[in-house]
Image: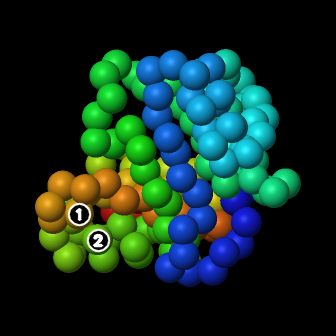
C-alpha cells in the first residue's frame, strides 16, 4: 500500500516499458532504486526507494502510449474526485475507478481537458453499490 502522503500529494507512479530488465537496470543505477516482485505477475516490479514502495515499472501492453506513465495524486474520495474531474472537463478512462487488491484503496484515471493522463488514489475502497430498489 502506498504511504499516506496526504490529499493533493503524489502518492504513487507507474513507469511503462518495453524492456523490464533494461528499465530496472537504468532506474536502479540512476536513482539507487530497489525492486520487489509484484504478486501474480512477472510483467511488473514494485519500485522501492529508501525502504518505501513508491511505484511500479510495468511491461507495456502493445506500444507505449501517453497513458503508459502515470502519476497518482492522493485524494480523500475517489468517486467524488472522478466526478469533479469530469465536471471540470476531464474524461474518465473506461474501466476506472476500481478497488485495489486486499482493500488497500481505489484508483481512478482521467484525461485532463488537454488530454494528459492523471491518476488519483484513495486509501479508501469504493463505496458499495446500493442494490436497485424493486417497485411493488
Q: Residues within 10 Å of mark 2 (few under 14, many from 20)?
A: some
Q: Quadrant of residue 56?
A: top right
Mark 2 → mark 1, Cα distance in angstroms: 8 Å
Question: For this rendering, which residue is in front, 23 or 92?
Answer: 23
Q: Give me the residue at 66% from left, 22% from top.
A: 41
User: Could you tell me residue 37's position as x and y percent?
Assistant: 76, 30
Q: Is residue 64 toward the left or the right of residue 87 in the image?
A: right
| Foreground: disc 2 or disc 1 | 1
In terms of secondary structure, where does tag 2 sit?
helix
- Name the residue beneath numbered marker 2: 85
Classify mark 1: helix, strand or loop. Answer: loop
Q: Residue at x 45, y 21 (%)?
A: 18
For residue 104, say whether it is visible. Answer: no
**Residue 2 has which mark?**
none
Does 86 appear above or below 47?
Answer: below
User: Residue drawn at (20%, 76%), measured in percent from left and top?
Assistant: 88
Mark 2 or mark 1: which comes first in sequence? 2
List the residue tagged with mark 1.
112
- Left or right of residue 16: residue 50: right
Residue contact between numbered discs 2 and 1, judged by CB atoms under 8 Å:
yes
Q: Residue furthest front?
A: 30
Residue 36: image location, x then y, percent = 78, 35
Whether residue 2 is visible: yes
Q: Residue furthest right?
A: 51
Along the horizontal axis of the image, is 40 left or right of 107?
right
Percent across and percent down for residue 32 are 73, 45
**Residue 62 picture quarter:** top left
Q: Position of residue 66 (x, y in %)?
A: 28, 42
Relative to 13, residue 25 above or below: above
10 Å neighbourhood of mark 1: few (<14), some, or many (≥20)? some
Relative to residue 87, is residue 107 depicted above or below?
above
Report the quarter where the N terminus lies. bottom right
Amino acid at each position: 500500500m502506498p504511504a499516506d502522503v496526504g490529499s493533493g500529494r503524489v502518492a504513487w507512479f507507474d513507469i511503462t516499458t518495453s524492456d523490464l530488465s533494461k528499465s530496472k537496470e537504468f532506474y536502479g543505477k540512476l536513482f539507487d532504486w530497489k525492486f520487489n516482485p509484484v504478486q501474480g505477475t512477472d510483467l511488473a516490479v514494485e519500485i522501492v526507494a529508501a525502504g518505501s514502495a513508491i511505484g511500479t515499472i510495468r511491461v507495456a501492453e502493445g506500444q507505449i502510449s501517453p497513458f503508459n506513465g502515470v502519476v497518482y495524486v492522493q485524494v480523500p474520495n475517489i468517486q467524488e474526485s472522478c466526478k469533479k474531474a469530469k465536471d471540470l472537463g476531464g474524461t474518465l478512462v473506461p474501466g476506472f475507478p476500481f478497488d485495489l487488491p486486499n482493500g488497500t484503496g481505489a484508483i481512478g484515471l482521467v484525461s485532463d481537458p488537454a488530454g494528459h493522463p492523471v491518476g488519483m488514489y484513495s486509501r479508501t475502497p469504493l463505496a458499495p453499490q446500493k442494490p436497485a430498489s424493486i417497485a411493488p
